[in-house]
Amino acid sequence: MVGNNRVKHDSKDFRACLNFINDVLNAHVLALFFSAADVETPEQFAKALENNFNWPDMLDTLSGDIYSMKVHEWRQDADGPKKDVVGRDIPLENALHFLRDMLVFHDYEDAVRCGDTGMITKCIEYWCVLFQGTTLSNYASEMVHFIACIKRI
């Protein structure tokens, strides 16, 4: 779709995959801004910006939506023992999870580039919590060990 033939599901080209994922993240962020500004085209968005658009309130709202537990609450509200998908907007749930996790990864990349060890540690702590909720027990235990070593040392 984007003309990059080096990106495949089993690709070994890390930079090509990372560039593709960053493009997808940028598209999600732009779509989120368009949605928050209630516009559909770049021209409408430019006009919204010219009309003294309230950026601080919009960013507070968007970050609250991305980093809150709304998706978890939506899933808890679903009926049935297997959390029936009827009435749920699963693409929206997945998009919010993607945005949240990729923004943390983006912070991690920036922290590595700048040498900000405090932010690197915060990102790794976040991933530590995420891995605890998966079946990846090796990653989970190593992350806990790593964080414990960082905190202790």
Image (cartoon, rainbow, N blue to C red):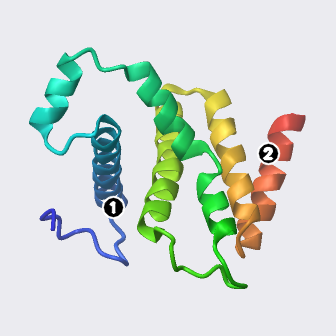
Identify the image quadrant of residue 118.
Answer: top right
Which quadrant is the N terminus positioned in?
Answer: bottom left
Identify the image quadrant of residue 53.
Answer: top left
- The kind of secondary structure element at disc 2 is helix
Q: In the figure, is residue 110 to the left or right of 1?
A: right
Q: In the figure, is residue 103 to the left or right of 133?
A: left
Residue 128: x and y in percent read 73, 53
Which quadrant is the C terminus positioned in?
Answer: top right
Q: Residue at x 46, y 23 (%)?
A: 57
Q: How many marks?
A: 2
Q: Residue at x 55, y 27 (%)?
A: 115
**Which residue is identified by label 2?**
147
**Which residue is identified by label 1?**
17
- Measured Cα–Cα span from mark 2 to mark 1: 28 Å
Q: Earlier in the sequence, mark 2 or mark 1?
A: 1
Amino acid tagged 1: Cys
Amino acid tagged 2: Ile
**Disc 2: CA contacts within 10 A as few (<14), some (14-19) or many (>=20):** some
Q: Are marks 2 and 1 in contact (CB under 8 Å)?
A: no
- Considering every residue shown, the one lying at the far top of the view is 52
- Considering every residue shown, the one lying at the far bottom of the view is 81
Q: Nearer the viewer, residue 62 or 141?
A: 62
Residue 16: x and y in percent read 28, 59
**Disc 1: CA contacts within 10 A as few (<14), some (14-19) or many (>=20):** some
Q: Residue at x 62, y 31 (%)?
A: 119
- The kind of secondary structure element at disc 1 is helix
